[in-house]
Amino acid sequence: MTEVWPGRPFPLGATWDGGGTNFSLFSENATGAELCLFDEDDNETQIEIRERTALNWHCYLPGVEPGQRYGYRVHGPYTPLDGHRFNSAKLLIDPYAKAIDGVVDWAHDANVLPYVPTGDEDADLEPDDEDDAAAMPKSVVIDDAFLWEGDRPPRVPFADTVIYEAHVKGFTMLHPDVREDLRGTYAGLASEAAIGYLHHLGVTAIELLPVHHISDESFLSERGLHNYWGYSTIGYLAPHSEYAATGRRGEQVREFKGMVKALHRAGIEVILDVVYNHTAEGNHLGPMLSFKGVDNCSYYRLMPDDRRHYMDFTGTGNSLNPVHPSVLRLIMDSLRYWVTECHVDGFRFDLASALAREFFDVDRLSAFFDVIHQDPVLSQVKLIAEPWDVGPGGYQVGNFPVLWSEWNGVYRDTMRDYWRGFANNGSFAERLSGSADLYEADGRDPFASINFITAHDGFTLRDLVSYDHKHNEANLEDNHDGTDDNRSWNHGVEGETDDPEITALRFRQQRNYLVTLFLSQGTPMLLGGDEMGRTQRGNNNGWCQDSEISWYDWSENPGKESLRAFTRRLIRLRKEHRVFRRNSFLRGKEVRGSGLPDVWWFRADGNKMTRRDWQGGEHALGMFLNGREITNPGPQGQELEDDSFVLLCNAEPEDRVFTLPRRRFGAQWLLELSTADPTAEAGSERYGARTEVKVIARSIVVLKRAT
């Protein structure tokens, strides 16, 4: 007979102390709970938890060691009309599990729904009494110990950060230099080949699509698909077990930590894309995997006048309830765990507006922000918001508080439009210079803007210049899924072509986007694979494509290598010149006594832009960036000076001749790079003041002032 001690209410979850394991589970509305232990043959031992303190059900089991699989069965009323959905026939994942073994087996006969799926619209009102343990993942007790060997966070300043958005599996799944048994795993991403590539490219941070334990949707299983992106979380403290090469009984935790340590050794930070706005349990007809059965009323936002149904600010069927103190505690405990125990360097919050809704409206003074801002750990890491959700008033670009940076969707849309000939010069210049209109008034700096042209959600860069329309047939939704607002242009042919002129123009446009991205004020984020022309064959919603559609193609060809070399060159240029990564916004005036403004905009004829030029006219613009007007001091308080540059941008379909500014801006200028001739070496051309520079149609020329 298993010996059971009272144990402690905190910490929540399963905590091994060397002699046994303490188990603690929060449930405000439960009437009882059972801890279920599973042996190697999946035989279940149920242990009644009799102690309840501060709404936490707890016990201690001597002799229970790391690797032990477990779950919970929670008792209480099954009254969906009141918001309660307790069903002790259903095994539940521990919300605080630090490791989870396996995924939901949708093909199994066991029913993981808490009701009998009759198809009737009121089917969920009656509970199902079928045990589902055979189809459910199991929580795992772990040993937290890990040999960090003096690991320290790189702490790269935001202004110096270059983010690379990537997927753990997709990045290495086809990599020929990664050992086959490690491809698609944390260990694969920690391999010498993978880290060497990132280091050589020059990025300073990798932003990983969700790695919290993921549960597929049932309809995907029926279609033979998987939730590849992973925005379907069921375990907020557990790294997804299917990305582990070494095992699923706690080994995934050590493997994840080893990946972080290896990336840190290369000076690369790890940022996690986290999904605290909803869970994998769906709406009132969704499965019961964890939170819904532990305490539905506490964990989820329910409709005030109809508690059977969920408030849905996310488009997924439910919204987690951060207004409840124990749910907010779960989010904070999860975040702190990943920083303190796993050494991650920051977070990108999916649909972050949903977390800021106190009751209905998005509130920048919400408890969620308050708790993070006062936290001595979380306030010191990188905090990035996806500043929108699907609810009313959810689009909040520019409205998050200090300490937060944001995915700048306005930047993305404007830059896509400008190089298609749609956005005006004023909009383009506003984004190029750091989006002060969005971030300056509330005391933030240019790096509050996470600048991006493409991201996982939408076209890749190559597809952005190759397709007018989405081609999502492989998702098996008749091409109805995915946005139609792509702001893309195929340049004359839909999809792949062997037309040399179209191909050349597409490569030039990709280079235009890359120059725009890396030479804009703010923090650049590169979608992984864009530097090598990765294509998803026109699929702009690859969320369910765990296949070669999404995986990186590492095969070589001259076009790929040329684009990759050009990207490395741009990142190096940005790193070498502070003028492209200022800590303060441009003023358009002289501050430090250089005799020139920090930025000056001019037309193709070399004269200053007028209001009419900003609002209309041709898509051609010159920008002078003054390296002697950097107002922020260096790390030792020293004054900073840099080279000065001119950017000549021509988004018109015809060549333009630019006249360089007067001599006081610079007597001589050297070619730095040209998107029309990516092989042209820096310094290979020299131009005098007021001389003419031909800028090829739809291209950029960057010049550096000769010293």
Image (cartoon, grey):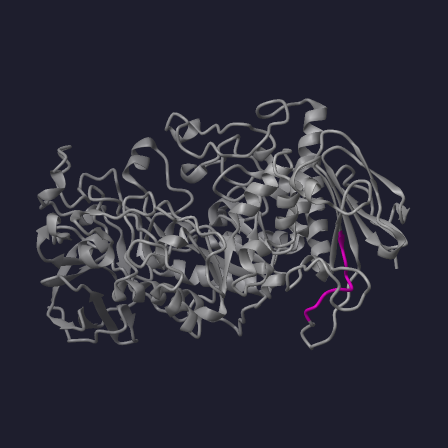
Depth check: give the residue in front, 502 or 188: 502
Q: Position of residue 399 (x, y in %)?
A: 46, 57
Q: Position of residue 445 (x, y in %)?
A: 58, 62
Quadrant of res 65: bottom left
The answer to whether residue 167 is visible is yes
Q: Residue at x 72, y 50 (%)?
A: 569
Depth check: give the residue in front, 167 or 303: 303
The answer to whether residue 240 is visible is no
In the rendered image, the residue lying farthest to the front is 611
- Apparent side of residue 707 relative to residue 553 in the rendered image (left or right): right
Q: Residue at x 54, y 58 (%)?
A: 439
- Apparent side of residue 93 relative to residue 345 in the rendered image (left or right): left
Residue 664 colored magenta?
no
Residue 353, placed above or below residue 511? below
Residue 629 colored magenta?
yes
Q: Quadrant of the C terminus?
A: bottom right
Q: Quadrant of the N terminus?
A: bottom left
Residue 77, placed above or below residue 590? above
Q: Main secondary structure of the magenta part?
A: loop
Write the start and end of the magenta stretch as one range: 624-632
